[in-house]
Image (cartoon, rainbow, N blue to C red):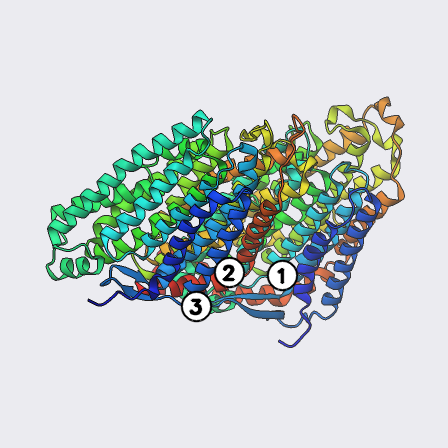
Amino acid sequence: MIFPDLNPMMPELIMTALGLLLLVFELFVKEKTNIVLVALFGIAFAYFFLGYSSGATFHGMFIADSYSRFFKYIFLICLTLSMLLSIKYLEIEKSLFGEYYILLVFATLGMMIMASSGDLILLYLGLELMALSTYILAGFLRNSEKSTEAAIKYFLMGAFSSALLLYGITLMYGLTGTTDIRAISLYLSSNQLSQNYTLMLAVVFFIAAFGFKIAAVPFHMWAPDVYEGAPTSVTAFMSVGPKAAGFAVLGRVFLMSFATMHFEWSIILSVIAILTMAAGNIIALSQTNIKRMLAYSAISHAGYALLGMVPGNAFALSGMLNYLFIYTFMNIGAFSIIIMLRSEGFSGEDISDYKGLSKTHPFVSLIMLIFMFSLTGIPPTAGFIGKFYLFSALIDAGYVPLAILALLFSVISAFFYLRIVMYMYMNDSNSEVSLSLSPALGLVIFATVIMVLYIGVFPQHFIAYARSAILSI
Amino acid sequence: MGGFPILSVIIFFPIIAGIGLTLFNRSKETAIKSAALVISLLNFLFTLQMLNHFDKTTSSMQFVERRSWIPAMDINYFVGIDGISVLMIMLSALITILCILISWYAIHDKIKEFYVGLLLVEGAMIGVFCSLDLFVFYIFWEAMLIPMFLLIGVWGGANRRYAAIKFFLYTLVGSVLMLVGIILLYEFTGTFDLLKLMSINLPYKLQLVLFWAFFAAFAVKVPMFPLHTWLPDAHTEAPTAGSVLLAAILIKMGAYGFLRFSLPICPAASIAMTPIMLVLSVIAIIYGGLICLIQTDIKRLIAYSSVSHMGFVTLGIFALNTQGVEGGLLQMINHGIITGALFLCIGLIYERTHTRQIKDYGGLAKFTPVYAGIFLVFTFAAIGLPGTNGFVGEFLVILGGFKANRPAGIMAATGIIIGAAYMLWLYLKVFFAVPNEALSVHKDLSKRELLTLLPLLFLVFYVGLYPNSILSYMHQSVSDLLIHINMNDDTQAMSLLHRFYSIF
């Protein structure tokens, strides 16, 4: 028996070892923030090895290619930024337990496995690992009703969606006799099973399961409550990581296994995308809680990214990848500002808490302004580049009405993003808001705003990288 | 392309220097204001130097800079100017200086941010006029929205939030529709480069789609009827400097867009759509003018007069003959000077009386004679009195309009009468009529305020008496533009159907 080649799995093995090490380490350490330092070392290790691990192992179950590498970069960046965000936040919330960071590491491990999965069972494994970790993270504030409710809601609905996914996988297995993604695509194309009803059913189940993960309409109902209830640093993590992971598997499974059915699922996905953009943007207009507003905005951004799946070609897929990369920075940046407003006894979650912020904290207001404009998609920020590249791909494939719709929805989104800007700059403050700043938080804000501005002005490299990443599919 | 990158300098110097302005200590107000003034003066000197080296005899792009930006999509940082853009750039640079001067004592809080915003808008404005790559153009076009939104919304009047968000959303919808058009054009031709696009003969259907996509953005900006409703609110609620920038430069960008992009890239469609454009222009002239007659707020009156005057500009442009286009272009400059001056004047008096309602005024000429005299000059210029610049522009436009479409020309001429009506009525009510004794406390113009208005006063007469000073710059570019348009079409007498089939 040949021992499978572990080289492509190095980053995942490092993350597993890191998680386990931290579990033990956590018992002995008094100052919980030291866990973060050790974790950052481990992440740096994994990051380094990411560049050198490629190939397929375990008989093609585990594929480490440029596509998965792109997503793993997103996951690791998301993990690093979320960890740094959490330090101060957990202190304020009085929930400074070391398990938090361990769960983050395991969630990221699950995401990395998902991105690299070449087999549906491994995909399920990664998905469950990520999901279970995030369920606990969502309910991390033990004394908060909202947090517990968020965790329960997330768990129940997540369980349903995982069950749907399993059902879809079993249908695929029954149909093709294999759970390997590449083998399935070969089987389907060689046996011309494009019009098979069972296959259609399986596709629908997959869409439902993945749609839940990326919070697409009509599988989005959990998102606002979970995002609002969970600790803000977890929300920051959840709004980026699991979403990107969902898109990673969506891309791989749908563009490989279901390639023959492209016409059918592209219609379904475009309808879902339109509904998602519509629901996300329109419902966000009436939100008064900023975490809820950003939850709906995250839903709408999932809608935009989903449009990248619709044409089913390389250009559009690279647009989706690019958009997710940029979205990571914008979204985590926005959440980090929200975390800053959380101080002792003041939740800072209502949008009216932002009134007059420019008078008391001009620099922070400016950074929030940049993030809000980036989320809307106004040049010269990165958000515009993401939308531009994605919609170019869409129009190139001939989906012009979709692109026009998407752009009009982003105009609608301008209202609620700019409402924050208006509150900060054009209103007077009700009360003195004190910001809780820490070096780690400052680092995160600095990194995200620099990236948002840099990608907005010099996007060449990032676009080129997204283009090269999809070559392996 | 080994020359000194003067265009990049005049675009980015205000932007970078403006960002540098944020390093100043908030309390050193005079230092901030002086620094902003110096930056804008320096930028104006740079533009003068550029003008010095400008070659009037050629219509090809000058001071061209081209650098690869996003190779994956063949996007280049491609800037250059010709006779059409150079005038707008000069106007932008000059108006910014005047805006900074007028706001010296008018803005009381967040002074640093205000001047940073002004300089950022200046950089973006000049960027719009220099861009020869559609992507770069779009970036500057949109980027300008952010500081302008803040300028209106933070330092504006009582209803500023509504005006700011209305301005932003209205312009954004137009811009994203233009973005769809730009991307469509890229997908069809594979390039964003304007010069390459001009040389490609696009199919008529595509031209039509593109024309309307660009129309969405430019018509909102100009603004053309019926997309003009953002303008009165934005102009009225903005602070003086914001109103001046809006009226003098920003709305010209829409007309500039028609000249620079719609006409060269979609010539056949532009010619076919001329009747619609002429109708909308005439409606703007007359309707805009009529609304002015019932206004009670001075600023709102001047704002609606902008709609009317821009109707002349679009009429001139879509007359598609030399007089019309040159008249439209000249009128763009003139209107920038005149309406910019009018808003400056209104801002001055508002600083003193804090009211814009006409009923609160009367007999101002008795108390502030110098101010009244200067305002009178600008009123005459707005009416189009011979001797002032307004006359030359409107005359050329009506001449061109007559040649293109006689009814349009006649109605436009009627519009001038309406213009005289509301402007003289305004002047009468505010400066003459029964003196309102409450106004006696107000002082006449200070040296700084006089200094601000003097350049525009000079230009009104200089351009009015020697219009060739401005017109000489545009002859070459306009004639080549018209040749380019007519190259794809024999005469304007061809029926629409005949034209349609002749393309294939």
* Residue identifier under label 1: B84
Q: Secondary structure at mark 1?
A: helix
Residue under the point 19% across and 66% down? A1
Residue farthest toward the bottom in the current orientation of the protein: B2
Report the front residue among B250 and A77.
A77
Report the front residue among A285 and A244.
A244
Q: Are marks 1 and 3 in contact (CB under 8 Å)?
A: no
Mark 3 chain: B
Q: Is residue A155 left or right of residue B8?
A: left
Is B152 above or below relative to B355? below
Q: CA distance from mark 2 to mark 1?
A: 31 Å
Eye-nearest disc, 2 or 1: 2
The amino acid sitting under disc 3 is Ile
* Residue identifier under label 2: A459
The amino acid sitting under disc 1 is Ile
Earlier residue among tags 1 and 3: 1
Q: CA distance from mark 1 to mark 3?
A: 21 Å
Q: Secondary structure at mark 3?
A: loop
The amino acid sitting under disc 2 is Pro
The image's mark for residue A438 is: none
Q: Is residue B447 left or right of residue A238?
A: right
Q: Is residue B333 left or right of residue A415?
A: right
Q: Return the x and y of residue B404 as percentages of the image width and height.
A: 53, 54
* Residue identifier under label 3: B200
Quarter of the image containing the N terminus of chain B? bottom right
